[in-house]
Image: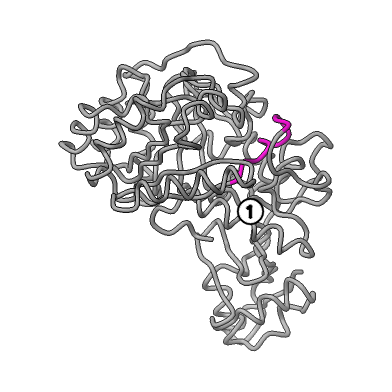
Amino acid sequence: MSTNVHSNTTGHIENQINLVIEPYLHIFGDRVYNPITNRATFAKDRGYKELRDIVEKNKPINSLPQEIKSLLINEEWIITESNDEELSKRFFLKYVSLEAHTVCNQACYFCPVSIDPREDFFMSLEQYENIVSQLSEYKDSIEAVFMINYNEPTLDKNFIDQVRILKQYELVPAINTNGTGLTPSRTDAIMDMGGIGYLSINLSTMDRDMYKKDRQGDHIKVVMKNLDYAKDKEIAEAMDVVVLGKGDETHKNDFKEISEYFSNSYFNVKYAEIMDRAGYLNVGHKPSTPRSNLCGCENIGSRPLQHIHINPKSECFICCEDYENNYVIGDLNKQTVKEVLSGPEIQKIRRWSYGIEEAPDNFICKKCVFAIPEKESFKQASFFRRVARNVLNIKSLGF
């Protein structure tokens, strides 16, 4: 929907400006969210009804009262029309996944590592700091730097130094770990640095036999020893134990047992059901049918617009679900972070994932539960938004 605006400040028409609805909006049943501005609007907000009328009822922008139209323009729900390529250069960087190595000491059934482990590769500490220094240009918008993708970050001999580097550049370290390497000495080292922003422990059960079966590793004793030491220390602003499972009675019982165990500690215990990693696994939630019309992404914010994912070889790729890195959008050995975030490869991915251009039939987002479906599927999209929000809740996630 577009409309013409004429400048009449001198009493005559000077320029014609086309106004359009922001094409990257996330439209949900209870809100509208703009991932470019990190702004959400709700039913109680002025202009909300009129915005939905434009989006859902195709109401002309020029039919709006001037006061409401000015509000929607000022808040960037309505923007000046531009070509698709220019609009897809924009981003709002909130989250970083910076994986410094490929190694994991477990093979969990709900993780691609269990069926296709990667070759060992470690990023040098020098390159790590080089990347972090570039990311620090966006420190005002970045809410967390996750030190993981499909690895176990504590296996890196440079782990504590990496945390220190992130803090040195005023970025917020976020650690997701199975807990095997979160030793008392490392907990103390992190405490001595003033703590981190987020700590999440992936703990699906405390039963030793089930733990070994689920993860192909007999680690529960060392994990519980480490967590017993850490649980009474405020190592992070937000501390979670995430209980992943299939949503069955065993999962619910494990969640109850773990919740009771950590009830008088700094850890918040979260319940989360597994998903199929955009078709890579044969377990977990998945779309009932491939997404035919893509309308965006809500996986802890918008992956194409609000995240950057960096593997140990310094390649940037589309998303955490892209285990094989089939969608490489840049290379920090040859490019800067800024060049990658506004480059042609990520521009194309943004247009595909938001339905501005038709994506190939095998495009990863068409197989992903976190892809925003068409309007009639608001209820399903809201469910998976709640799942993501329960797994991670640091600061304001913007959705």
Q: Relative to 131, does residue 56 appear above or below in the rendering?
A: below
**Which residue occupies the foreground of this view, 358 or 263?**
263
Left or right of 372: which side holds 134? left
Which secondary structure lies at badge 1? helix
Q: Amino acid at mark 1?
A: Phe
Left or right of 226: which side holds 66? right
Numbered disc total: 1
Quarter of the image for the N terminus: give it.
Answer: bottom right
Give how far across and how far down residue 338 sits, in percent. 47, 37
Q: Relative to 221, does residue 242 appear above or below in the rendering?
A: below
Query: Quadrant location of residue 372?
Result: bottom right
**Residue 305 visible at all:** no
Mark 1, other Cα within 10 Å: few <14 / some 14–19 / many ≥20: many
**Residue 284 visible at all:** yes
Q: Which residue is mark 1?
A: 384
Classified by dominant secondary structure, the portion drawn in magenta counts as loop
Give how far across and how far down residue 44 sits, in percent. 55, 83
Q: Residue furthest left?
A: 192
Task: Point out the stretch of residues depicted in magenta.
Answer: 273-282
Seen at 70% across and 35% down, the residue is 283
Quarter of the image for the C terminus: give it.
Answer: bottom right
